[in-house]
Amino acid sequence: MTDAAPVVTTRRDGAVAVVTIDSPPVNAASHAVRAGLVAAIAGANADPDVRAVVIACAGRSFVAGADVREFGRPPEPPRLTDVCDAIEASAKPVVAALHGTALGGGLEIALACHARIAAPGARMGLPEVKLGIVPGAGGTQRLPRLVGVPRAIEMATSGRPVDAADALASGLVDRIAGPDLLTEAVALAADLDAPRRTGDRPVPAFDRAAVEAVVAKVEARARGRIAPGEAARLVLASADLPLRDGLAREWETVARLKETDQARALRHVFFAEREAARVPGLDGVAPRAVTTVGVAGCGLMGSGIAAAAADAGCAVIVVERDEPAAAAGRDRLAALYDRRVATGRLAAAERDARLGRIAVSADRAAFAAADLVVEAVFDDLDVKRELFAALSAIVRPDAILATNTSYLDPDAIAAVVADPGRVVGLHFFSPADVMRLVEVVRTGAVAPDVLATAIAVAKRLGKLPVVTGVCEGFVGNRVFSAYRDEAERLLLDGAYPETIDAAMEAHGLAMGPFAVFDLAGLEIARARRERLRAAGRLSPAPTIADRLCERGRLGRRAGRGWYAYDGGERRVDPEVTALVEAASAEAGVARRVVAADEIVRRLVGAMAREGRALVDEGIAQRASDVDLVMIAGYGYPDWRGGPMFETAAAG
Ligand code: 3H9
């Protein structure tokens, strides 16, 4: 057996000991890292020639957190809290040199140091709530001592990282370095006369009533998640408890939360997201360079895709069918960015920069400059085939053509292109600048580097790409159709739209199925039923949804669908109740009360069954991909892990 290289090493720079963690890929605080750090701090304290210490990391990032792979087993000492305590207690000043992402346990190590210096691009955060836990090594107790209770609550409950400038302004870091982080960190350490312990600082005064109101809001918005409220309460407790007691309470909380179903589900999602990136056949395949993105169509979907590309720094060429449509597209894009400015999500100057990257015209020849063109025109096969035939004569030979179709066969679209290997599906979800999911559809003839490029572009746009094979509806809409069919069966058995929605919303979905059908509009599903009937795959007997459509109840935009809408509020409509009851009578079904747990079990089960079929057919690569699609595209609660995970966990 050969000894692995040590993951923590110490070298001397004058009187400063530079402790370097080198544990790829992200220097997670594994057992080896923790033991190495404790030994390094002890070594520096024992060495009479050392006056101060710097903790830095090799590779792309400072410590990105506790090692999530160790979460399934009991912590092996030294625990991360022991590491942080040893650093804070050091008799010699310790400076953290931060680059990349200092997250979770990584930020906690930095908080226990006596000073922090950050590279200009560094980001710092406490993302533990995204794993269903709270910070466990001082994050909720030391952070408020540096940045104050309100700010610490914001960071610990949202999980969002802050950048270096923000960290400097809030007092989280002492300095932002120039180009040579390590040299400046050593100089800072050499300048410190004595340790300045974060734990010795008082928690700055704050408005308790205002903070209590914020905590209540965090709890209300968590919609079933436990961790954010617990994190907020722990931060608040930092103001009332001595450091030791606060740390003990924090540790007890994290130990308890780690074992919850929510934490297990969120860990599943964490690893599922990384797994989704692994696509058989793409190992070592380099994506093509994409800097200019073309978008055909500037409706709701096209404008969202254009904005997502502009947000990611791409040059964007949008083409509409004629000049009036192009003008409407420009207005739509301006309105999209204006909304972000009005709601404080974007600075006005940034809006102008992003809009400045988008050129909208009515001239398809403009696509000659694009590396990739995504079509988002009307979902009709003839329209798309005409467009792709024209595009293949306009774009460069190496440019990629992507279709955003939801239901059509992308292979039938690719067939009109001279080189179908350049055609791929990029199925965005509306609003495309906001929704994280992109189904990357592996068309029959797609070239490996075209598929790799589609995945890389989706990632660059900040999306979660999930690769699917070709079938009607791909993964998401197929699972959603199974969900819809089961929801309608529940109606026949005795449930009502409002009881079904209430059950699923209590389960953690942002909206129950019938509220979603109304939001999306009932026409698309009606068109699907008509296609299925034409193909002899569905009974010609009208469904309740067909009856609603006949009555002009086409959903929220029409002011009525499964519900009636008064000023945006949904309301149970007796006309729908009567239609539901009549449908049961017509089908000869004696209605019964269907309990919430049966509703949830049947709907989740229907999704999982369809998901399993998609995996068996080779359309979905793996069960966890189905979970990701439902979470990132359809509002399934991530803390339940997705329908496949939940069904498997329930046995
Ligand atoms: C915590 O700290 C609790 C504490 O309060 C104390 C408790 C006592 N562990 O995402 P990427 C792997 S909770 C183990 O593709 P990127 C990841 O699996 C933790 N492994 O790269 C992948 O491996 P592979 C709080 C980890 O550049 C590889 O690194 N911290 C961890 O897009 C690359 O990952 C977090 O929640 C980890 N903690 O993004 C941070 N992190 O190649 C979670 C990553 O084999 N991590 N890996 O698939 C992230 O947010 C992103 O990974 C990061 C890099 C931004 C760091």
Image: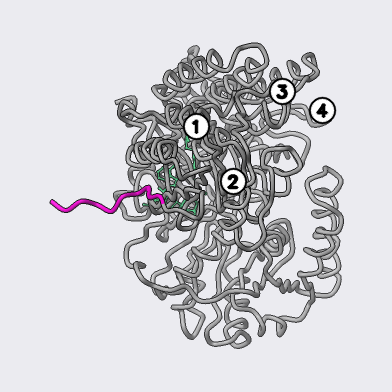
Helix or strand or loop: what does disc 1 sit on? loop
Earlier along the polypeptide chain: callout 3 or callout 2?
Answer: 2
Circle 1 sits on which residue? Answer: 90
Helix or strand or loop: what does disc 3 sit on? loop
Q: CA distance from mark 2 to mark 4?
A: 64 Å
338 up-or-down from 645: above or below: below
Q: Residue at x 57, y 49 (%)?
A: 98
Q: Residue at x 66, y 55 (%)?
A: 177
Residue in the foreground of this view, choosing between 467 and 15:
15
Residue 550, position as x, y percentages in the image? 68, 40
Earlier along the polypeptide chain: callout 1 or callout 3?
Answer: 1
**Mark 3 and 2 residues: CB-CB less than 8 Å, in contact?**
no
Earlier along the polypeptide chain: callout 1 or callout 4?
Answer: 1
**Mark 2 and 1 residues: CB-CB less than 8 Å, in contact?**
no
Judged left or right of residue 633, residue 46 is: left
Q: Is mark 3 within 8 Å of ligand 1?
A: no
Quadrant of the snapshot with the C terminus: top left
Mark 4 residue crowding within 10 angstroms, few (<14) / some (14–19) / many (20+): few
Circle 3 sits on which residue? Answer: 573
Residue 473 in sight in this render: yes
Circle 2 sits on which residue? Answer: 189
Badge nearest the viewer, 2 or 4 = 2
Q: Main secondary structure of the magenta part?
A: loop
Q: Residue at x 67, y 20 (%)?
A: 220
**Start-end of magenta stretch:** 1-10
The colour scheme used to paint the residues is one colour
Earlier along the polypeptide chain: callout 2 or callout 4?
Answer: 2
Residue 292, position as x, y percentages in the image? 65, 75
